C-alpha cells in the first residue's frame, strides 16, 4: 500500500523543486492528517522511543525539587506558570508535582501549562494528571501561555525541532562558502538528499555558530532555525517577569560537523526516507549554538553539562537508595534504571542539561 505522505512529498517536490530539510521534517512530523505526532502515541515500550521519565520516576522527582528551588530563586511568586514543552504522556509532570508537593506553598502557586502538538497525547496527559490537584492547561505554543513568572522545561524537545543542513563548499569564502542540502527525487523517483551548488541563503548563513569557522571542505553542519525563535520568546517572557527554561537533550557541548538526522521506528534506526510520517525524526542538539544565541539575546546561560552530573547534583542516587529501602523487592530494577539514566555508555554522557534564565538570578541548582 503506497505511503500517502510520501506521495504528498513527492508531488510537492515535482511542483516546486527540492525542499529544505526543515520542510521535510516539519511535514513528516506535523502534517495534520498523516504526520507522526498528530496521529499517535509514540512513547514507551510499544512505541518508537522511550524517554528518561518513562525509564524511572526518579528523573521527574528530582526535577520537581529543582523546580521548587527555582521558584524560591524567583522570589516565591504567588502564581507560577510551570510549562512543559512536548510533555509526552504527562508522566514527568506527574512525578515532578508529586515530589514538589513537599512544599505546599509551591504547589498552591503552580499553574501547569502543557505545550502539545498531538491530540492523542493530550488525552493521555489529561488522564495522567487528573488527580494532581493543580490547574492543568494546554496551549499550542509557548507564546499562548499567560504572562507571569515561569519555569519552562523541555526534555527531549529540542531534538525534534526541524533542522537545516549546510555543506561547506569553500572554507575560505566565509558565509558564501556554504551550500544547502535539500530533499529531492533520484532517477528512480525515490526521495533522496540533493546538494544545491549555489551559496546558501543569507537567512541561513547569518545564523552560523562560531564553530562553523573550523569547517573543512565538504563538512556538513546542522543548524536549527527554531532555536532563535524559542530564545526570542523567552526574552519577551522574561522581560517583565522572572523565569527559567531548562532543556535536557542529546548532543555535544561544542559545535560538531556531520549528519545526525535519524529516523526511529520500534526503537530501531531506519532510513530517514523509509516511511515518512510513520517514523520519528530527530537530530542532535548543538548546545554551543544554543548558548551563543541565548547569551547574545541577553539571557543568563549556564554551561551544558552531562545529564549524569546534573542528576547527581540533584540527589538522584540518594533518591534511589530511599526507593530501594521502601521497595526492597525492586532493588535490581531501580539499579538498572539508575544505570540507564547515569552511565556514560547510556544516557549519562550523551544527554546534556542547560538553563536559560532572566538576568540576575542565582545559579540554578545542579548547574554551572
Image (cartoon, rainbow, N blue to C red):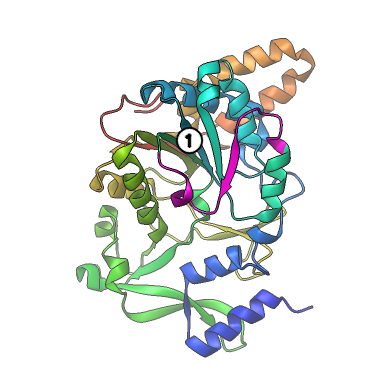
Q: Residues within 10 Å of mark 1 (few under 14, many from 20)?
A: many
Residue drawn 61% across and 86% down? 189
- The prevailing secondary structure element of the residues shown in magenta is loop
Residue range (magenta) = 128-147
The quarter of the rendered structure image containing the C terminus is top left
Residue 337 can be seen in this image: yes
Where residue 339 appears, as percent x and y from the top left, is: 62, 28
Q: Residue at x 35, y 81 (%)?
A: 197
Res 223 visible = no
At 20% from the left edge and 71% from the top edge, which residue is drawn? 173
Report the quarter where the N terminus lies: bottom right
Dot 1: element: strand
Relative to 169, is 116 above or below? above
Give the labeled residue for mark 1: 81
The residue under the point 37% across, 68% down is 166
Is residue 276 rendered to the left or right of residue 175? Answer: right
Amino acid at each position: 500500500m503506497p505511503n500517502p505522505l510520501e506521495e504528498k512529498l513527492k508531488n510537492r517536490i515535482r511542483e516546486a523543486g527540492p525542499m529544505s530539510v526543515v520542510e521535510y521534517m516539519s511535514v513528516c512530523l506535523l502534517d495534520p492528517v498523516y504526520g507522526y505526532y498528530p496521529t499517535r502515541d509514540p512513547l514507551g515500550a510499544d512505541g518508537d522511543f522511550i524517554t528518561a521519565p518513562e525509564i524511572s520516576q526518579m528523573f521527574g522527582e528530582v526535577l520537581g525539587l529543582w523546580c521548587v528551588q527555582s521558584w524560591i530563586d524567583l522570589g516565591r511568586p504567588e502564581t507560577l506558570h510551570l510549562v512543559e514543552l512536548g510533555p509526552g504522556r504527562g508522566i514527568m509532570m506527574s512525578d515532578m508535582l508529586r515530589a514538589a508537593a513537599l512544599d505546599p506553598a509551591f504547589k498552591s502557586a503552580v499553574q501547569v501549562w502543557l505545550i502539545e502538538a498531538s491530540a492523542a497525547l493530550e488525552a493521555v496527559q489529561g488522564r495522567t494528571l487528573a488527580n494532581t490537584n493543580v490547574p492543568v492547561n494546554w496551549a499550542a505554543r509557548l507564546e499562548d501561555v499567560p504572562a507571569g513568572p515561569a519555569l519552562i522545561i523541555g526534555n527531549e524537545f529540542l531534538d525534534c525541532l526541524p533542522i537545516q543542513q549546510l555543506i561547506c563548499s569553500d572554507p575560505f569564502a566565509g558565509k558564501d562558502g556554504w551550500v544547502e542540502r535539500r530533499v529531492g527525487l533520484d532517477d528512480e523517483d525515490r526521495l533522496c538528499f540533493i546538494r544545491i551548488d549555489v551559496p546558501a541563503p543569507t537567512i541561513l548563513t547569518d545564523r552560523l555558530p562560531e564553530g562553523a569557522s573550523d569547517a573543512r571542505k565538504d563538512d556538513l553542519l546542522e543548524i536549527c532555525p527554531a532555536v532563535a525563535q524559542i530564545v526570542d520568546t523567552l526574552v519577551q517572557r522574561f522581560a517583565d517577569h522572572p523565569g527559567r527554561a531548562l532543556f535536557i537533550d542529546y548532543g555535544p557541548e561544542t559545535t560538531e560537523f556531520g549528519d545526525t538526522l535519524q529516523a526511529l521506528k520500534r526503537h530501531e534506526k531506519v532510513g530517514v526516507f523509509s516511511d515518512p510520517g510513520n517514523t520519528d525524526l530527530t537530530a542532535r542538539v548543538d548546545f554551543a549554538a544554543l548558548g551563543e544565541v541565548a547569551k547574545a539575546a541577553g539571557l543568563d546561560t549556564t554551561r551544558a553539562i552531562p545529564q549524569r552530573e546534573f542528576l547527581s547534583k540533584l540527589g538522584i542516587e540518594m533518591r534511589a537508595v530511599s526507593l530501594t529501602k521502601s521497595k526492597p523487592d525492586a532493588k535490581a530494577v531501580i539499579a538498572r534504571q539508575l544505570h540507564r539514566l547515569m552511565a556514560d555508555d547510556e544516557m549519562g554522557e550523551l544527554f546534556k542539561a542547560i538553563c536559560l534564565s532572566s538576568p540576575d538570578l542565582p545559579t540554578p541548582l545542579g548547574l554551572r
